[in-house]
Image: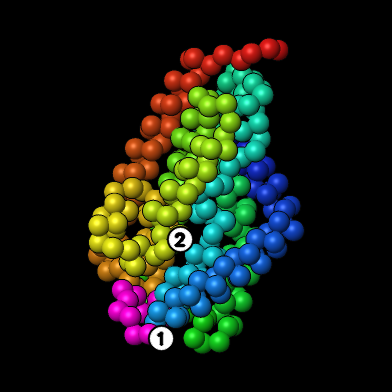
């Protein structure tokens, strides 16, 4: 456990150094959040029946922007990707460590460091916005506690999914197409593009099949009170089941590729 914790601390410290990148991301997220609010406001002003109250939607959008870097599905580790492409990954496999958990700790640390730099400024600024567009507090203490728990479990799920995608890179010559397909599908089915509550019933059913909504849509809707707390408690068990399944499958894939890995050159 100690070696993996060391990898985590090192990558987290490195991630905190990218402050200018975090500032650029903040500007993008504020712009995107405001644009989404203006678009949805047009529907609300026209009296269209909606599955979320206006203030619920506002908080949902700002929370999504605040924790965007933490839950973003397109987060990759360039060092890992380059080591696979160049063949340097062979040195990783000869280390007396489990390469799955070594990479898992690196990717999670990168997500946490990026999220740490961005979430607090977004929350502080959005709380101070005009009341109609400001982030509101949680609907209840229970809802807030479940928001924290489900978001942390969602972080583990998103990292486990990223590990499977990194393992698939051993079978491809380039990672761009793979990550673009995965990223677009994950963004949509997680509720990051359109809140799942606004989707047609048939599409919601499909979203509930995949684990992506457990990372984004579930925590945000628990925070604003759009999901009953009893459903939140039940879904936590679903999150744990997905974590066990994804981690087991990811470990299996890494062991499989390690037995068939061939590095050209030297």
Image position, residue 157 (x, y; %): 42, 46
Span of residues in magenta: 46-56
- Asked whether residue 235 appears in the rendered view, the answer is no
Q: Earlier in the sequence, mark 1 or mark 2?
A: 1
Q: Which mark is residue 145?
A: none
Q: Residues within 10 Å of mark 2 (few under 14, many from 20)?
A: some
> From the viewer's perspective, is 97 left or right of 243?
right
Residue 19 magenta: no
Q: Nearer the viewer, mark 1 or mark 2?
A: 1
Q: Residue at x 44, y 81 (%)?
A: 42
As helix, strand or loop, the secondary structure at mark 1 comes to: helix
Picture quadrant of residue 115: bottom right
Q: Which mark is residue 193?
A: 2
Along the line of sight, the residue nearer the viewer: 21 or 148: 21
Q: Residue at x 61, y 19 (%)?
A: 90
Q: Residue at x 34, y 67 (%)?
A: 198
Along the line of sight, the residue nearer the viewer: 28 or 202: 202
Picture quadrant of residue 21: bottom right
Image position, residue 25 (x, y; %): 65, 61
Marks 1/2: CA–CA distance: 21 Å
In this picture, is 148 found above or below 1?
below
- Asked whether residue 176 appears in the rendered view, the answer is yes
Q: Which mark is residue 45?
A: 1
Residue 51 magenta: yes
Picture quadrant of residue 262: top right
């Amino acid at each position: 456990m100690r070696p993996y914790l060391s990898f985590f601390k090192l990558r987290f410290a490195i991630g905190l150094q990218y402050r200018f990148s975090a500032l650029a991301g903040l500007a993008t997220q504020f712009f995107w959040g405001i644009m989404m609010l203006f678009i949805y406001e047009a529907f609300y002003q026209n009296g269209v029946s909606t599955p979320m109250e206006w203030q619920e939607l506002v908080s949902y959008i700002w929370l999504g922007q605040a924790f965007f870097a933490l839950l973003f599905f397109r987060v990759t580790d360039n060092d890992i990707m380059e080591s696979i492409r160049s063949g340097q990954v062979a040195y990783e496999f000869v280390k007396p460590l489990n390469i799955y958990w070594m990479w898992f700790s690196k990717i999670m640390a990168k997500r946490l460091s990026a999220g740490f730099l961005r979430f607090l400024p977004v929350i502080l600024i959005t709380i101070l916005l005009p009341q109609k567009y400001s982030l509101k507090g949680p609907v209840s203490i229970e809802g807030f506690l479940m928001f924290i728990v489900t978001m942390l479990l969602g972080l583990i799920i998103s990292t486990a999914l990223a590990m499977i995608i990194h393992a698939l890179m051993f079978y491809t010559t380039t990672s761009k197409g793979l990550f673009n397909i995965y990223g677009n599908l994950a963004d949509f089915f997680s509720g990051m593009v359109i809140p799942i509550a606004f989707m047609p019933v048939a599409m919601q059913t499909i979203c509930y099949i995949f684990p992506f909504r457990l990372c984004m849509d579930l925590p945000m809707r628990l925070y604003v009170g759009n999901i009953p707390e009893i459903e939140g408690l039940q879904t936590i068990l679903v999150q744990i089941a997905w974590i066990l399944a994804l981690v087991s499958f990811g470990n299996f894939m890494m062991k499989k590729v390690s037995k068939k890995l061939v590095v050209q050159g030297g």
